[in-house]
Image (spheres, rainbow, N blue to C red):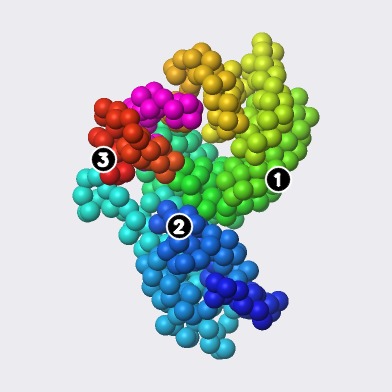
Amino acid sequence: MSSCRYGCHSTQSKGDTVSRQRQLGVVIRAARCARRMTQAQLGRACGYSASAISRVEAGVLRPTEQALLRIAQALDLPLDAIGLGRPATLAQDVTPDQEDAMLRRQLLVAGMAAAGASMLSSASAAAARPDASARIVGALYEPEPSEPTSLQQLKASLISARAQFTAARYRHLGDFLPGLLGSAQATREALSGRSREEAHGCVARAWVLATELALKAHSDVAWPAADRALAAAQASGDPVAHGEAARVLAITMRRSGRPAAAVDLLRRTADSLSQDRNDVSWAVAATLLMTSAYTAACGQRRGDALDLMSGAADAVGRVTSARFRPSTPLFTVDATSAQVDLYWIGVHTALGTPDEGVPYAARIAPGQLPTAERRARYGTDCARMWHHLGDHRKTFASLRFTEQVAPEEVRRPALRALTADLLYAPVTVAGVRELAARTGVS
């Protein structure tokens, strides 16, 4: 067994050791995400590189006891959550199933404790509660005991959850999701045949929402949530649910530094959906192409990004023509010309040509965007565009617009970073300090 300069050992192929190390990695990742730390931040706190932390979380490197102590200290984790101070969890007479159950419980406790410690509340400490990422960790590893319900009731609950998301009421959605996920999965297990396939689709969409929520928080919990969504969508046999799940999975891939693989996944799924002469399938394919274009732009693949956006615009044109009009809304995104313009802003900003996004921003009337979440996205993308152009006042105006239409959006990590940049910029903009105070930046 070889060691690295970070005080970690390379893993061997023994099944029980590898399984234990992977579980340990999950615990560390969940606690880090709950505290809203990046791998680089945790690495700096422990004296490691971001790459070393990534390999520990993936179960590829096994930290020494001394290294684990430093990680536990940085994440404020109890020692038993990482296998220290509780020798019984590693004893020979504990079965693998028992060990997995204990580790899952430790994961939940660690994630919830870290989340609670990292909460920022502008009202009072008494108002602090676990954030959405910690709630999703609980739904993944310690689901709430739930009773099955009817498919009709389950679909009504999904509509209610979707309304919370599109209204940008993320804290309410985080409170609601664990119960919805438990109910959806219990209902699926109680059904068979075609009804079970429909329930798979409901489970998939519940996990799509969970992934969307985790992505809003820039949390790595999005990975397992997106995986659950895709598995349920595939079991449902519904190509539209499959497309929705593929979209959120691709976003997690892009966020983890794999834009090329994400573009390939989105293209394949969009091509498959385009084969169906179905207005809703075409609409989902259009949204996948837009997401793919933005992903290509993030990877600095300018030609691909522009081609994909042109394809998305053509697909939206077909959807909104007199002949093709979606009879039901997409689950989290709409395929409209205003949506295409919105994506053009993000694509040009990602490509480093934000000036080319200005005309698209100018021709969007925010009222054209159908939900508070989409209007907030407009404000966010404009803020990023103006920030890249060096216009601090317009950046602040866009952030204030976002706060007005969706107050929870400006507390997202990406927008708080923009606010911090404005706060410490050489140009003083009236109102920035107050915004920073409201959003916990200062």
Contact check, label 3 and label 2, Cβ < 8 Å: no
Q: Quadrant of the C terminus?
A: top left
In the displayed structure image, the side of residue 399 where residue 354 appears, left or right: right
Q: Position of residue 377 (x, y in %)?
A: 47, 30
- Name the residue that disc number 1 marks: 261
Q: Secondary structure at mark 2?
A: helix
Nearest to N terminus: mark 3 or mark 1: 1
Closer to us: mark 3 or mark 1?
A: 3
Q: Secondary structure at mark 1?
A: helix
Residue type, mark 3 in image: Ala
Reply yes or no: does residue 403 show up in magenta: yes
Residue visible at 36% across and 63% down in the picture? 113
Closer to us: mark 1 or mark 2?
A: 2
In the displayed structure image, the side of residue 87 where residue 17 appears, left or right: right
Reply yes or no: does residue 409 show up in magenta: yes
- Name the residue that disc number 3 marks: 437
Residue visible at 66% across and 10% down in the picture? 322
Nearest to N terminus: mark 3 or mark 2: 2
How far is mark 3 from mark 1, CA to CA? 39 Å
